Image (cartoon, helix red, strand yellow):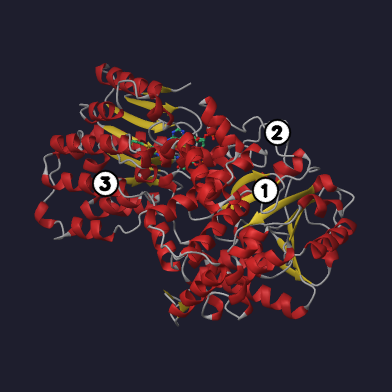
Amino acid sequence: MAKVEVETRGDVAVLKLSNSPVNALAHGVREGLQAALAAANADPAIMAIVVTGEGRAFSAGADITEFRSGMKPPGLGQVIDGMEASGKPVVAALNGLALGGGLEVALGCHYRVASPAVSQLGLPEVKIGILPGAGGTQRLPRIIGVEAALDMIVSGNPITAAAAARAGLVDRIAEGNVVDAAVTFARELIVSGTGPRRASDKTIDAAAVPAGLFDKKRASLGRHPSGPLAPKNCIAAVEASVVLPFRDGLKRERELFAELAGSPYARALQYAFFAERQAANIPDIGAEVKPREVKSVGIVGAGTMGTGIALAFLNAGLPVRIVETAQAALDKGVARIRETIESNVARGRISADEGKLRSANLTPSLEFKALSASDLIIEAVFEKLALKTQIFGKLDAIAKPGAVLATNTSTLDVDTIAAATKRPDDVVGMNFFSPANVMRLLEVVRGKATSKDALATAMAVAKRIGKVGVVSGVCFGFIGNRMLEAYLEEVQAMLLEGATPSEVDGALEAWGLAMGPNAMMDMAGLDVGHHIRQEHQISDERRRLYRFTDAIVGMGRHGQKTGGGYYKYGGDRKRQADPEMEAMIRAEAAAQGVAQRRPEAEEIVERCLLRLINEGAQILDEGIAMRASDIDTIYLTGYGFPAWRGGPMWQAENIIGLKVAADKIRGYEKVHGARWTVAPLLDRLAASGGKLADAGAEQKPA
Ligand code: 3HC
């Protein structure tokens, strides 16, 4: 239960924030802290107060779930202001992470002692679309300086205890137990007669703030991952700390906070935070299903995907065996892995010892048998079904009983691959995104026969290597790429209608996408999609829409790697509009009799978004996705969809409206035909007033 525990150590009261797992500052904690502070101040035997946290955290800040329901008094700001006003010195004992309101509590304390192991002290509010609203924007600049505070608040990135000590945020790094050290610190204050040291008493010397600091920061924001509002208000709040007295600054902070709190961007970012965590819950897999132990990993294939996957595991400290069929390919892959590790050492991202350990954890081999002891084997060869089934037959013969066998496929039928073994229950899909050591998304594909514990193992492994695992059922392209197909098809249609690649990409990037679809296809390689279209049956309509793309692939224009695709690329790899390409598209449009009309930016965004939404709704209805928020998580973590837009399904439900979306889709169907057939789920929900957020939760992938 959310509360504050009190322990009296002679003349020092130790108040412990206690709300497992991360001591979020829920109503009970705020009330408890306020009451415990009042009691300690009223007790003549108490001379100083220490505030700490239970377990692994000091506090992760305000309870984000309360933002939706509304916060009951006392507000956090009020509790912290009261604490700072305490006549007895208050010392924070930072035992673990202190984020957001958690750090604001520490800033309201008069002194701070930290455990050296604390790796996260920060104000990440901007990442959930708000700003530190309990005095953080006014106290932090007074404690560590305006420039450093501005950086921390606008980026939202945390610092370590050691860095905090250097910045003056932490007064002492504890040797041994941090609460003991804080009590000792408090006793030193008592003995020396040193009273409270309040951040609010400090004035900022405006003349010492670098000229133009705030304007420069505003100008540097560019495409901030938190969207257009929160970063600006963060800057304005810190600026207020310089130009206004403390109390007025606090008032300004609260006004700026209120502007953000109800904004769609904040709602979207907070939804995204919980959606990502929700993805780990699989309705029919409870705590009784134990993931299998994975102590070693085998990888088949040392190409781009295999090496990226190997790195992801090596980075997480797991030993990896990697197998190739030819020595040259194996050597090339191993060299690529070692180079990446060495460059991480050279850039100071990891220590030389850590680099050595990671390299030593890699065992290359030309023999399949080398994988016989691996707990998890991931096949990462070329995307060809016949090749993959053949490999799974071989793996079946050599893998130890109980090993999880995973296929890294982005389109192929996991059930067919599993059927090549006598143990389809051990087979699961693990669709990594390139570069596999960098991208956060891991689509975990649940086949018809996949056992619960094999699936749970893949999900646990995802978490262990720092990825966001999202479960998908089996269908062509699974969740992410199936939706991508629909979206890219629409892009092809708009190019034929007369929009240039730059216009399409520009419209979507201005809306917030990390990269427009044409630039993305050029980067991934146009030959990849071409190959998939050759391998699979696709509709005549899709073949028609892709005719010019297939033609340019035939001409050797494969995208960035060949110096040209939808764009042309100079030595700096920057995209440039290519009039020759645009003329070719126009010629193809003329040959197909497609009238030219340059769709506006708004239409470009709408058509792309609606195709994603419609396909997503269909995927949800088929039970391929367990819930709408999983679809959004996939788009946010794997496809460069801006988190402050929530994801396609969130947009449908919260911004567009399901009825409007269904009507618009029907409108486009009238113009463009069957590819715009509305997903029945959208119609059903529009008619019943139901929610995407409630659809699918009870469904399980096949
Ligand atoms: N409020 C409510 N729940 C929270 C929470 C918070 N601030 N922080 C974490 N949780 C929950 C998570 O949802 C999760 O719940 P679940 O187990 O039911 O899924 C559980 O705590 C554990 O969290 P994680 O799975 O994320 O655990 P990790 O160890 O991977 O990460 C963390 C811990 C770094 C604290 C991460 O959870 C995090 O970044 N939390 C958000 C921190 C944040 O944004 N704080 C600012 C809040 S806003 C604020 O303080 C406003 C103030 O200025 C007025």
Compared with 634, 686 (above or below) is above
Tell me, yes or no, if residue 328 can be seen here. Answer: yes
Image x and y of residue 351, in percent: 52, 65
The residue wearing badge 2 is 285
Residue at the far left: name it: 207
Residue visible at 85% across and 56% down in the picture: 399
Per the model, the C-alpha gap separating discs 1 and 2 is 14 Å
Residue visible at 82% across and 53% down in the picture: 416
Image x and y of residue 26, in percent: 40, 26
Secondary structure of the residue carrying tag 2 is: loop
Residue at the far bottom: name it: 571
Q: Residues within 10 Å of mark 2 (few under 14, many from 20)?
A: few
Screen quadrant of the C terminus: top right
Secondary structure of the residue carrying tag 1 is: strand
Residue visible at 15% across and 56% down in the picture: 209
Q: Amino acid at mark 2?
A: Ile
The residue wearing badge 1 is 444
Instruction: Give the mark nearer the N terminus: 1 vs 3.
Output: 3
Compared with 410, 531 (above or below) is below
Image x and y of residue 535, in percent: 74, 64
Q: Amino acid at mark 1?
A: Val
Image x and y of residue 34, in percent: 31, 22
Picture quadrant where residue 151 is located? bottom left
Q: Amino acid at mark 3?
A: Cys
Per the model, the C-alpha gap separating discs 1 and 3 is 37 Å
| Most foreground residue, 20 or 631 | 631
Q: Residues within 10 Å of mark 1 (few under 14, many from 20)?
A: many
| Most foreground residue, 409 or 102 | 409
Q: Residues within 10 Å of mark 3 (few under 14, many from 20)?
A: many
Picture quadrant where residue 597 is located? bottom left
The residue wearing badge 3 is 234
